[in-house]
Image (spheres, coloured by chain):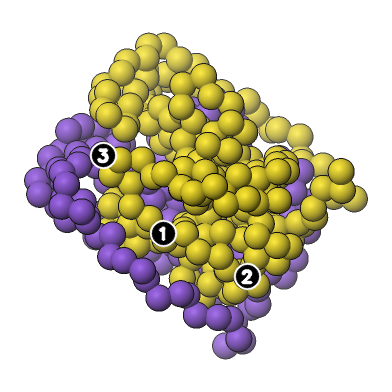
Chain colours: A yellow, B purple
Amino acid sequence: MAARLPPPGADFTETTVTTRLVYDGGLVKLRRDEVRLPDGKPAWREYVVHPGAVMMLAFVDEATILLERQYRYPRHRHFIEIPAGKLERDESPLATARRELVEECGYEAAHWWHIASLDPSIGYSTEVIELYGARGLTHVGHHLDEGEHLETFAAKLADALEWVRTGLITDTKTTFALLWWAQWGRFPTS
Amino acid sequence: MAARLPPPGADFTETTVTTRLVYDGGLVKLRRDEVRLPDGKPAWREYVVHPGAVMMLAFVDEATILLERQYRYPRHRHFIEIPAGKLERDESPLATARRELVEECGYEAAHWWHIASLDPSIGYSTEVIELYGARGLTHVGHHLDEGEHLETFAAKLADALEWVRTGLITDTKTTFALLWWAQWGRFPTS
């Protein structure tokens, strides 16, 4: 059994004094808050307000998943990723996952289960990504969003893991999902 | 041997038409670019311009590393993380790692080696995090930046990995480092 976390030595909570939307773009919303530090001093924090996202290990069979290849403009290159997407307003993470698997990859899945949660950018974003597993795939045809360009392919988990080791896959959600599954992955029995 | 990546089916490169700094904060710099999509249509991309960062597995012994506990305002809670920090201007990643290990944890390390690279937020940030290993630690006393509040503790790798499995550790850089090392970690022989 794992040791418990050591008891906190101190409470470092920062309390909000004021909050202000400083940039409201089509994709990125940025806030700048005045805060009070645990020692009582004033400071400020800037961060992206994110609606949350999902990602999925979509199993073609027990050893094979769907991957995507797409261009990521901020890094000016193509990336290999698992299917993923952002929550729309009032959409649950599972509903988002179902929607994105059809839109991006053209598949519906009979069985879905939650695997883990990931905080990809705790220094400057509120984003949380929920990881789901999906199996029992049926091809229904994809319909990418306007302006979305990507291609989907099936890959062996063992190969994808090797691509993490050799640095061909460096996207954080994809490395997390592949490494987590390699360590603890087990299909739900029901 | 792992299979090669399938050959690209298409080039999805998006080319820059204009680029504009739309927010220049103390922490976050945000750009909005007009781009040309692979099908020739116009679009825009918003993204955080990040100087890059480092993170480190700092080994107290072969089975024990340094962890930190700190409050992350965007997520409004404390997180367990490995030591990390952002590059300062003209600073190399390794120099940043050496500096941050002293500043945050109070240790110098005799041996450093590069382990892997991680792209934590390819949808809306240029950030890349370089993961280093450090061993041969000597305590020299820490000196946190003004306004920086955190505590450092040593933990068994096996316990930290279990904290990933149970969701006590969800920070992406920390989960990546722990899972990567659990899968492939090996100390350099020289």
Camera-side residue of A66 and B100: A66
Both on one chain, marks 1 and 3? no
State the residue position of label 2: A156
Instruction: Please indicate whether residue B178 sits to the left or right of residue A38 in the image.
Output: right
Instruction: Please indicate whether residue A73 sits to the left or right of residue A48 in the image.
Output: left
State the residue position of label 1: A151
Residues under numbered marks 1 and 3 in contact, where contact means CB atoms less than 8 Å apart: no
Name the mark nearer the viewer: 1 or 2. 1
Identify the subunit bearing mark 2. Answer: A
Name the mark nearer the viewer: 1 or 3. 1
Q: Judging from the image, what secondary structure is the residue with disc 2 in? A: strand
Give me the residue at 32% from left, 32% from top: A28
Q: Relative to A160, is B4 above or below?
A: below
Name of the residue lying farthest toward the right: A1
Q: Can I make out residue A100 in this image?
A: yes
Amino acid carrying label 3: it is: Glu
State the residue position of label 3: B46
Where residue A181 appears, x then y in whole percent?
70, 58
Q: Can I make out residue B61 in this image?
A: no
Amino acid carrying label 2: it is: Lys
Give me the residue at 20% from left, 40% from top: B44
